[in-house]
Amino acid sequence: MEYLSKQRYDEIAAELKHLINVVYPKVTDDLAEASAQGDRSDNAGYREARRIQGKTISRIRFLQKVLENSRVINPDILPTDRVCLLSKVEFSNLSTNTRMVFQIVSPHEMDLEAGKISLKSPIGAALMGGKVGETVEAQVPSGVLRLRIESITPA
């Protein structure tokens, strides 16, 4: 079971709807057109249309599974005194004295450029459940990071 924000759930649902109602019909039309052009063994257009069809079907199935196994999380019921899903956390790397701010999100919402890290990432997992002032350790590929939680902003 994955928990998603309402916004991300709606984005995934919209992408799925677009793939099913717009992209897939176009792909099947392109495939039928390429198929009508003759011998399929020498038809690069047909092979490309089949490849695109396979990718589209794969993406549709993936998004269906995500929505099937996800629930929208109600931010009003989340704790405000410790790091949890959808919390915005300001923390300091104690070895470099740098401060960072990230929102903890599900893996399907992760976007580093937007300041969102997965709760399953090493840093996200280390921060989960922490309280302001606590120091946590995150095992990352380059070693162990010691992080101090400076502030928590609820979703």
Image (cartoon, rainbow, N blue to C red):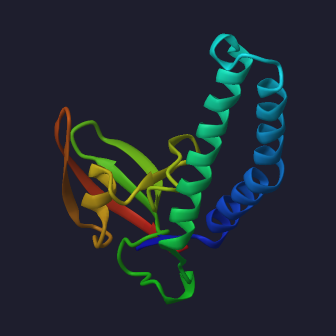
Q: Is residue 54 above or below residue 36?
A: below
Name the one closer to the observer, 20 or 41: 41
In the displayed structure, would residue 124 be above or below residue 97? below
Q: Nearer the viewer, residue 62 or 140?
A: 62
**Residue 67 sits in quarter:** bottom right
Task: Assign the N terminus to one quadrant of the image.
Answer: bottom left
Q: Residue drawn 82% across and 47% down?
A: 25
Which x, y percent locates residue 30?
Answer: 81, 32
Note whether 65 is above or below 15 in the view shown: below
Q: How far across and down, in percent of the image, does residue 96 sit? A: 27, 36
Percent across and percent down for residue 97 are 30, 41
* Residue 108: image location, x then y, percent: 50, 56
Using residue 43 as the reference point, say whether residue 26 is left or right of it.
Answer: right
Position of 85 with respect to 111 (left or right) is: left
Residue placed furthest toward the bottom: 77
Q: Name the residue: 53% across, 46% down.
A: 111
Quadrant in the picture for the C terminus? bottom right
